[in-house]
Each structure stands twice: as C-alpha cells, then as structure tokens.
Amino acid sequence: MAVYNPKSLKAEEFINDEEILATLEYAEKNKNNAELIDEILEKARPKKNGNGVSCAGLTHREASVLLACEIPEKIQKIYEIAEEIKLAFYGNRIVIFAPLYLSNYCVNGCVYCPYHMKNKHIARKKLTQEEVKAEVIALQDMGHKRLAIEAGEDPKNNPIEYILECIKTIYSVHHKNGDIRRVNVNIAATTVENYRKLKEAGIGTYILFQETYHKQSYLQLHPTGPKHDYDYHTEAMDRAMEGGIDDVGLGVLFGLEMYKYEFAGLIMHAEHLEAVHGVGPHTISVPRVKRADDIDPDAFDNSISDEIFEKITACIRLAVPYTGMIISTRETEEVRTKLLRLGVSQVSGGSRTSVGGYTQEERPHDTEQFDVSDQRTLDEVVAWLMENGHIPSFCTACYREGRTGDRFMSLCKNGQIINCCHPNALMTLTEYLVDYASERTKEIGFRMIDDEIEKVTKDKVKQLAKQNIEDIKNSNRRDFRF
C-alpha cells in the first residue's frame, strides 16, 4: 500500500488516493465549521511586511475545506480574498497568448478528445515549416508575442525533432514590427533528454494537463496509446525539471472526474513540486470539457456549473497565491469576466484550435480540438480587458532576462512586480496599440497607459518607462524591457 509522501518521485505516493479520500472526508466534515474556515481564510489573506506583501498559501486539506464550504458569507469572503491576492501579486495585468496547433495526428485513444486514433472522419493535418511561418505571420499581424504550441502524440508524425524545428521556425520569423518572443510548449509527456532539448530550444513554460488525477478513471479515459501510462504521465513534471525546465504548467480537465477529487490532486501536485524542486508550478490552467468533433460533454457525468467553476478558481488562488492562472477561449466572455476577478492572470485571445486555422479567413472547424466559446478578435479582447480595468500585457521579459522558476517567484514575493512587470506591460501594450489596434482600442489604451504609469513607485523606473513609451510611439524601436 502506497503511503502519502509529497517528496517522493513516485506518482502513487505524491498523488496518493488514500490521502485524497481522507482529505475529502475531512473537508466534508468541516464544511460548515465556521471557526476553522475563519482560521483558514485568515491564513490565506495577504499580509504586509518589510518587503511588501506576503502570502502563506494553503495546504490541500485547508483549500479543500474552503471548496466544500456551504456558508454563503464565507464563500463571499473566499472571493474577496482571491481578488486581494490577485491584485497584491499580479496587479491588474492580464497576460495574453494564443495557441498554435501544429498537428492533430495522434496515436492515443483519449475518449474526450477528437484527435483520438479511432476518429476516422476528422481531417488529419500537420503543418509544414512554410505553413508554420504563415501561421506565425498571421498571429504577428494580430499582435501576438506569446504562443503555446500544441500537437498530438505521434512518434512518427510529431517526433521531438519536428517540434524543435517548429520552435526554431517560430522564433526566426520577424514580420514588420512583429516577433514571437516566448513559445510555451504543450506536448505529451516525454524523456529527460527530450526536455533538455526543449530547454535548449529556448521554450518558456512546459505545459501538460493531467486530465484527471483519479488513476482508475484515468486508465478508462485513456484506454490505448502511450498516454495510458498514468505514472509516466503524472511524473512528467519531475523529468521536465530534471531536464532544466524551470517553469512548468499544471492543469486538469474539469468534468472528467469529481471536481473535489481533482482539486485536491492538483494542489497536492503543486505541493510536491515545491517540496522536491523548491518552486511550484509557474501556471495552473482550468479548462472544462467542451463539445468537439464526435465528443459530447454531456457524456461525462461530472460536469460542473459556472458557480462551482468560479469557486474552484478562487480556491486555487488562495492555495497557490504566486502561481499564474490561465483561462482559455473554451469559456464564454461572461465566465471569463468573472474569473479575471478571482485570480486568473493569463487569457488567450483571437484563438483558433484548428491546425492551420489562423491563415484562413473563415474560422475552420474540421480540425478543431474543441469548440471556441469566446470567438472575439484579439483587438476586441484587448479592448474588453481595458474596459474592465485590466492591463493587457504582451510582456515576455522575465523569461528572456532569466527571471524564471524560483527567481520569478522571489520577485513576485518581495513585491517588486510593480516596478518590473507593470511598466513592461505598459510598454508592450503601447507596441500593440501603435502597430495593431483599432482607433477605438487606441483611445482606451493610451488613456489607461497615462493613468497606470503613475502607479510605478520607483521614480527612475517611471521616467525611463515614459521615455520608452514615447520612443515606441514615435519610432520603430521596440522591445524595451526591465
């Protein structure tokens, strides 16, 4: 019988079924324990110290109690503290990215994904390097600087050499004033050697969704293919970090299994990375099962309501305060608006989830991985963010200045974000406004920049940022960063 041990490198020990079940029992027993809930909320609240603001975070058991809580005024307090934490460590910045689908060839049998091997009527496509260039130019013409590349698992069609070649191609494209400055990678679990190759290729974050932490369900949902190996998949982040990748991104696909089980497993995974490597996940994504070619989300009986989804997001923010949170265009504008308040720090915009979709005038559906609920253009997303008081950020400075892993976390924890990420966000927003934005978006954006630059506390940084912003407006000089 496996024993729970967050420092273990064995999946069954750091994601331990007995510990999760005991956690859920503890949470159920204490879901209306107002005194305990108040203690947990007080622990989670940001505290001022000599260096700025600090946050204790929560254990998987403490966070699970909050998720189970049924007391309306306590739930409201969870949301209020989530917003406090978000503003304390990320300010009102929202990082923007887009997915780029390279290939939908896949040898796995995942029952929730239309790319599964038995799907014989979906169009299979793999981008050539010329097609990759064309997609990148289309994304640059929208204004994107950060991509997350996606590909099915297929050793023949999508070997690591193909992924590396695509990364090299993406970074090589310089179109007008456009550059892709950060490529995040979302591909199947692989070897330490291959993770080293990805690191050497200059990737940003390595992202891998667990899908579900419930091992029995995982095996049923992945009946065939290399992804069927639960342990190999679950231990992938340790191999990635061993391969030198500082920033890794976790996520589960909510709706496949009971959400409270998934939540506990997700926080335990974050605790494990902290215990073993000294730094938790750089990001956590919170996708939900969505309709796609031959996939009906109603076939999964663990789907969650918008209200529960909001609660999950807020509780993750309290549990792992320094971790970025990502919400994709799987969700509607309405849902994304609410989640931005509760802790989300990254959103995709103008996304197409089909292979080769950005170069086509009409949104193609024949190779989509899932239906896109938020189909607005990037310009519309940028304007929406600003109208809701958020700064759209295209910044990639930390990654390129070596502020990754524990170095980024220390910057976040000591309160220096306002003098680094805040001006960087405003300078990259200026680039977007000058080069790509509609007149309406420019009007909103330049007004916001004038207001937000005054929040930078270090006068030298503020004055230099103002000068850089003027240089961006009046010349072709780009890519200023602190």
Image (tube, helix red, strand yellow):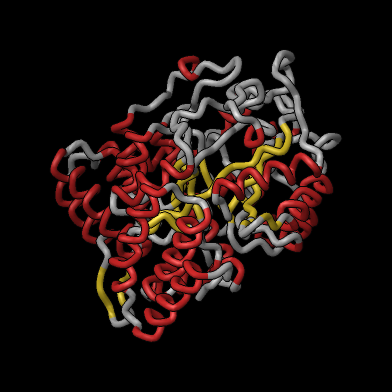
The single residue placed furthest to the bottom in the displayed view is 460
**196 sits to left or right of 407:** right
Task: Confirm whether residue 256 shows in the render.
Answer: no
Q: Position of residue 253 (x, y in %)?
A: 51, 34
Q: Quadrant of the N terminus?
A: top right
The spot of residue 358 in percent (x, y) is 63, 36
Which residue is nearer to you in this view: 22 or 291?
A: 291
- Look at 75% across and 24% down and name the residue there: 124
- Quadrant of the rendered image containing residue 293: top right
Q: Give the number of callouts.
A: 0
Report the residue at 24% width, 55% height from top.
81
Camera-nearest residue between 311 and 105: 105
Image position of 369 with respect to 133: above or below:
above
Q: Position of residue 470 (x, y in %)?
A: 44, 73
Of residues 210 and 376, the one nearer the viewer is 376
Q: Nearer the viewer, residue 312 or 347?
A: 347
Residue lying furthest right in this view? 156
Residue 261 at x, y = what percent?
43, 36
Residue 143 lies, with reference to residue 296, above or below; the image says below
**Residue at 39%, 54% in the rendered image:** 442
Q: In this rendering, does residue 126 appear at all?
A: yes
